Amino acid sequence: RGSHSRRPTDYEDGVLVDRLRPVAVAALVAAAGRKALREVLEEAARPDAPAVVPAPYSPPGEPVRVVRMVRGGAIQAIHFRGLGRWAHDNESLVVLRHPVGDFVSGGAVLIELYGGDPGPEAEDRLRSMIALGEERTIEQDPAFAIRIMVDIAIRALSPAVNDPTTAVQVLNHLEDLLRLVGQHPDLSAVLLATGGVGDAGDGRLSEALREGSMQAGSSRGRNRLRSGLVVAEIALSL
């Protein structure tokens, strides 16, 4: 390597292997989730931020135009400010029927417009403000970070893996992320707007934690997994 030191690449000195460990993945996901939560909170606090209305929402009258999906895909990001400016300039009410994180099939309703009809040429403009992809991402979808960590913990506590140590460490990262939500109550509404995490495990995480607490070899591990049930209930209630 010569006299000059350099940082190891992802493929040297076991760095790649380390980053593929479940706990390392959970740490990266938690960091991305915290970043996304802060950015979403800042965006939601802007005076021109769109209103978050819990479903079902019943706008007045019938929509003057319905914008449908051309192709199916997962909603990865929404240009909320752009949609807000467009609605203001066109004196329209723009209603998004799907939050970030939803997979929407081709032909399904994406946007409903109320007010004056801007014509069919507006449809492509509105679609361009919504980024689609093959799968969800964390950038505008902080609830997805929680879902990923829930899945890692469930997998670690499955009978085939039976790794309560990994589950305990993942719970630490999950709890740290949920603490940020607790510090900012407004984030609960934002998480609901992004689809929430209520169906992240359909109770599987709670059940896995109960089983894991009984199988854990140490009293410390059992106690941590039992306390993790509280974390799980919080995560699954958002």
Image (tube, rainbow, N blue to C red):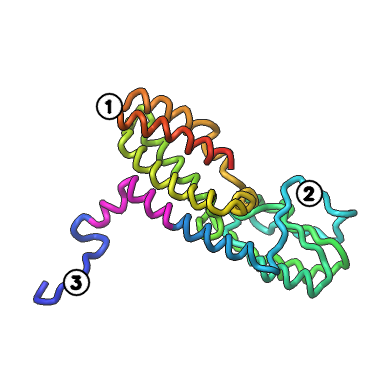
Q: Are marks 3 and 1 in contact (CB under 8 Å)?
A: no
Q: Secondary structure at mark 3?
A: loop
> What separation in Å lies between label 2 and label 1 (alpha carbons)?
50 Å
Q: Is residue 179 left or right of residue 40?
A: left
Point 44% across, 45% down: residue: 174
Task: Please identify, in this view, whether the residue under mark 2 or under mark 1 is nearer the observer.
Answer: 1
**Residue under label 1:** 217
Q: Judge whether residue 73 can be spotted in this image.
A: no
Residue 133, x across and y down, in percent:
55, 58
**Residue under label 3:** 6
165 in magenta: no
Q: Residues within 10 Å of mark 2 (few under 14, many from 20)?
A: few
The picture quadrant where one finds residue 238 is top right
- Residue 57 is marked as 2
Point 49% across, 31% down: residue: 204
- Comparing 39 with 138, the one in front is 39
- Return the residue found at the far left: 3
User: Which mark is first along the chain, 1 or 2?
Assistant: 2
Q: Amino acid at mark 2?
A: Tyr
Residue 24, x across and y down, in percent:
33, 50
> What separation in Å lies between label 3 and label 1 (alpha carbons)?
42 Å
User: Which mark is first along the chain, 1 or 3?
Assistant: 3
Q: Amino acid at mark 1?
A: Gly
Q: Secondary structure at mark 2?
A: loop
- Return the residue found at the far top: 214
